[in-house]
Amino acid sequence: GVYSSQIQTSCQRDPCEGNRKKFIVPVVVSIIAAVALVILEGFLKSKNQPFTYSEIVTITANFETGIGEGGFGKVFRGHLNDGTPVAVKLLSSSSKQGYKEFQAEAQSLMIVHHKNLVSLIGYCKEDDHMALVYEFMSNGNLRQHLFCMDDATNTTVLNWNQRLQIAVDAAQGLDYLHNGCKPPIVHRDLKPSNILLTENMRAKIADFGLSRAFSTDTSTSSISTTLAGTPGYIDPELHASGTLNKKSDVYSFGIILFELITGLSVQIKSTERMMHIVEWVTPMIEEGDIRKIIDPRLGNDFDVNAAWKAVEIAMWCAQRTSKQRPDISQVIVELKGCIGRNDENVRSEMTSLEMASYSYTLPEA
């Protein structure tokens, strides 16, 4: 734009150069385009170019620092050439996915950007070696902060406002996957260890890149799939039918919200057996004493009215059938209403959720 305006101005001042206009403009435009292409190629090479396995070894200092392990493989901390910290996930070599299929999936996921999603910035597929390179999240995952507190993990008790904000952040990331991506993306394995935290304790969803994208014309359109996910967080409807839709993620989100509220994990050990968190919390709701539900580590440092509202939202998400659950966009609106609510010590009405008559049966393993 700068070069072309200077040329036009120059031509207006000196008509004698008019005959050279047709020659000068294409040359300058070509030069600008060439420079832009070089810059773009450099950017793509530094950020989105497939990494070789030797580069992965260098980035991770020969896999020196392990920071986690999940169903898809081990995760290592590393640094790019410019010093940017990254997390490198090594995928199982038993995958039957071919290079072109893996490359296409990785490249499509690198254009999925949202402030509440962990960014995929590169990948490697060389022989049997497969790896995904993600932005590094300095405060680990939500599971560590809820259930693995000790000196080794350097974690502290999350306060009430932090818990609400983490829930809002995760819901916003999920909303982008469900309603902002075309085709929509279902996570399929949403759980606390897949919700990562920044240095400011803001949440981003991870491992959505290992989920399945599907086309849909309606909010309840679904696909048939092999059962995926983590016991306790899996949609009971999915157990019965093997049919997956966006509301399956909403169910998982509801379970995570209960964990944030109670400080308890999804499977609770009672005197006689293991109980699912929804089975445990339902009679507590009927008793009407929020202090029996809320994480005791919070003491009295929480808003009673907001806590009841959060419980309502969690139960709404955890309804047994997908038709009874809200879209995640509705959840965001309700959760934001919890933040900053005045503590009136009044339990809000729950008739819309039919909490008292809610029944829960554990799905078969």
Image: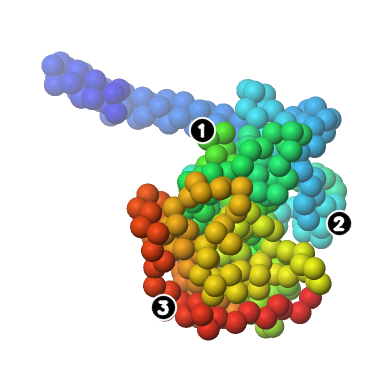
**Residue at image coords 60%, 74%:** 283
Can residue 104 be seen in the rendering of this structure? no
In the picture shown, does residue 29 fall above or below 204?
A: above
Say which of 85 and 232 sits in front.
232
In which quadrant of the rendered image does the N terminus lie?
Answer: top left
Identify residue for label 1: 40
Q: Amino acid at mark 3?
A: Ser
Q: Residues within 10 Å of mark 3 (few under 14, many from 20)?
A: few
* Picture coordinates of residue 197, whole percent (x, y): 59, 42
Identify residue for label 2: 94
Identify residue for label 3: 352
Per the model, the C-alpha gap separating discs 1 and 2 is 35 Å
Which is closer to the viewer, label 1 or label 2?
A: 2
Residue 352 as seen in the image, left or right of residue 96: left
Say which of 13 and 66 sits in front.
66
Q: Quadrant of residue 124?
A: top right
Q: Residues within 10 Å of mark 2 (few under 14, many from 20)?
A: few
Which is closer to the viewer, label 1 or label 3?
A: 3
**Residue at image coords 52%, 53%:** 167
Whether the residues at callouts 1 and 2 have beta carbons within 8 Å, the answer is: no
* Picture coordinates of residue 210, whole percent (x, y): 68, 56
SS for dot 2: loop
In the picture shown, does residue 14 fall above or below 120?
A: above
**Residue at image coords 51%, 49%:** 300
SS for dot 1: helix
Per the model, the C-alpha gap separating discs 3 and 2 is 48 Å
